[in-house]
Amino acid sequence: MEQGKKFKTKTGFCHILPDRIVLTKDASVSNLQTSPGNHIGKILFIYAIIAFVNFYFAYKGYKLDNTLQMVVSALLGIILIYGIVTSINNSTTSVIERDKIKEVRLKKAINGITRSRFEVFFEDEKGKIKKRLIMLPGSFKSGPIETDYAIKTMTEEKLLS
């Protein structure tokens, strides 16, 4: 069993080991099931299809002089395209080598609207800088207490300054 520190995340645990960061669904690193590749591309492709369907409905609304349909569909399409553009360099990897980490940022929660999260910028196998979000528990799951502990852990491990 590898030694390291761990804290709760939105969907599991983050283990800070001497050589890497591992995200798991349960409290044990030994049960890690890594899947090859990064699956965010598939999700972004689905979002792109939905965005283009919305643009099609916006065009149909324009042709039928249905302003509400046109505006709502166009706005949904624009929001999805914006989400794709901002997420293109995100990663879903569950293992990040510590020597590949460039920076770790903390984004504090806006009460009732967002969760606290860490943004880990690292270099992937192809040499590209990727961002992995580590979402922390929300306010209904003792979020502030877990967030304080996670910040303390990341600071002690010299990942967060």
Image (cartoon, rainbow, N blue to C red):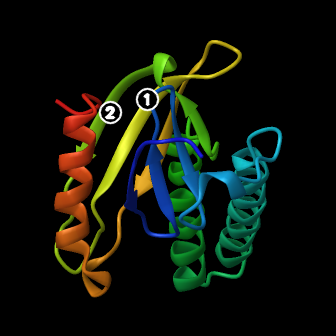
The residue at which mark 1 appears reads as: 121
Residue at horizontal 77%, vertical 60%? Answer: 46
Label 1 packing within 10 angstroms: few (<14), some (14-19), many (20+): many
Does label 2 or label 1 sit earlier along the sequence? 2
Residue at horizontal 83%, vertical 40%? Answer: 36
The residue at which mark 2 appears reads as: 104
Depth order, front residue of 85/29: 29
Name the secondary structure under disc 1.
Answer: strand
- Residue extending furthest toward the front: 1
Name the secondary structure under disc 2.
Answer: strand
Tell me the kind of residue under disc 2. Answer: Val
- Residue extending furthest toward the right: 36
Whether residues under marks 2 and 1 lie with C-beta atoms below 8 angstroms apart, the answer is yes
Q: Residue 79: horizontal and vertical position, in percent? A: 50, 60
Q: Is 14 situated left or right of 115 in this image?
A: right
* 85 versus 115 height, above or below: above
Residue at horizontal 60%, vertical 66%? Answer: 25
Label 2 packing within 10 angstroms: few (<14), some (14-19), many (20+): some
